[in-house]
Amino acid sequence: MNANTLANQMQLHGAQARHASALMAKASAAQKNKALLALAAKLRAHTVALLSTNAQDCLHAQAAQISSVLLDRLRLTEKIIETCALGCEQLASMPEVIGEITGLKEQPSGIRVGQMRVPIGVFGMIYESRPNVTIEAATLSIKSGNACILRGGSEAIHSNLALALLVREALAEAGLPQDGVQLISSVDREAVGHLITMPEFVDVIIPRGGKGLIERISAQAKVPVIKHLDGNCHTYVDVTSDLEMALRVCDNAKTQKYSPCNAMESLLVAKDVAGVFLPRMAAIFAAKGVEMRGCDKSLAIISKVPGAKTNLATEEDWYEEYLAPVISVKIVEGLDEAIAHINKYSSHHTDAILTQTYSHAERFLREVDSASVMVNASTRFADGFEYGLGAEIGISTDKFHARGPVGLEGLTSLKYVVFGHGEVRS
């Protein structure tokens, strides 16, 4: 496709999305929920066909020698498709938020002032590998009364096209505009360049992928960007933690799945429990082939564990998002050092404390500057579906508008509404 043709196509996508956004914004809750339930049924009915299409994408990706992390994210399973269907149903069951008026207060002048929740308008979503993001983005767009333009990675093009077709069918069955959700079929990288520089059509861009992709979009976009760059997530095992629970939670946070951005990448352990906890934790990691990059003190303990793969951690390791069976390990004096370490090296995504001391948990929640902060739970729960949002469009580590998993409310805005009885300002 030549440059002029691609530019015209992207302008058409934008114009269609802007037109559809007005129709989506005034759609009834019943219509939106009907589309979501229809999509859930279609996902289940077409599971076999979707898995077959996805298998072809995976074969092409393997031939192109993409990384194991991206290949893992590319692959659809029956469980993933069912989770998408459940997400549709969960969103459909959630209360309607569009048009909700909150904080209505009467002022001395007699007017009443409140805020109404409204759709953002049109968002662009750029993502790599994960075809399920097509469904998560589409369903959240529908429920929030927005229109969206989706651009997935070339490695997942056939899977994404098949999923987007089901979305458009569900929209039509509910009497909603099919252009409320559009998938860019071009795999030309310049399509992204056009999408992120169309402020007349697109209100916000949400990138979901590798650091390079997000850095490029953040630097070049002419519209606001909701993003996170890294997922360097920490778990701190406090001096008063339940060690049996800590072993279970840390194992899950690291090894349940290595590739997500909410997997634990750094383990901090209070010095007074390190001698008891670390040998057992290291044995679990060794059995699963997890390499441990530790400080001097932690290496003195974990290197004695049979089969342990260990290396001395560098300064860069404390910042690293591995997305692999590798973890950094550090022994700290206690809570103060743990909080200081996390705030220095964390990507402000998700960090957790394992403790039985309420005051320690309270301080950790208050002082750790991250989008999600947890007590006695695996960082793997930092997810829109697990948070009861129905789905998530991504994770934001920004502090304005949306922070943490971006779900339904993250795709809306608030405008002031004023009710009067003929009042005039003196």
Image (cartoon, helix red, strand yellow):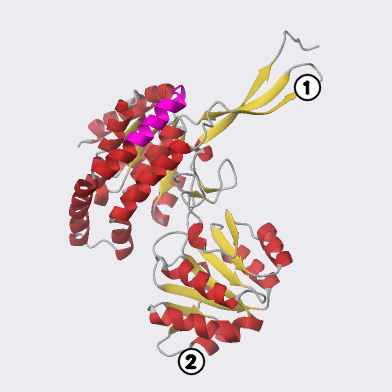
The answer to whether 44 appears left or right of 367 in the picture is left
The answer to whether 295 appears left or right of 204 in the picture is right
CA–CA distance in space, label 2 to label 1: 70 Å
Residue 401 visible in the shown view: yes
Sort mark 1 into few (<14), some (14-19) or many (20+) by Cα contacts within 10 Å.
few
- Give amino acid for label 2: Lys
Sort mark 2 into few (<14), some (14-19) or many (20+) by Cα contacts within 10 Å.
few
| Magenta highlight: main SS | helix
Q: Nearer the viewer, residue 193 or 309?
A: 309
Count all numbered tags in the image, as a single digit. 2
What x and y, as percent, mark residue 73? 33, 57
Q: Residue at x 54, y 82 (%)?
A: 278
Establish if 288 lies above or below 302.
above
What x and y, as percent, mark residue 323? 41, 65
- Give amino acid for label 1: Gln
Q: Which residues are magenta?
A: 25-38
Residue 127 visible in the shown view: no
Dot 2 corresponds to which residue? Answer: 304
Q: Nearer the viewer, residue 200 or 392?
A: 392
Q: Nearer the viewer, residue 260 or 287?
A: 287
> Please, which residue is most extreme toward the top here?
422
Dot 1 corresponds to which residue? Answer: 107
Q: Residue at x 80, y 16 (%)?
A: 109
What x and y, as percent, mark residue 389? 49, 44
The answer to whether 246 appears left or right of 124 in the picture is right
What x and y, as percent, mark residue 128? 34, 51
Q: Residue at x 34, y 43 (%)?
A: 134
Q: Where's the N terminus, which quadrant?
A: top left
Establish if 112 lies above or below 6.
above
Q: Where's the C terminus, which quadrant?
A: top right
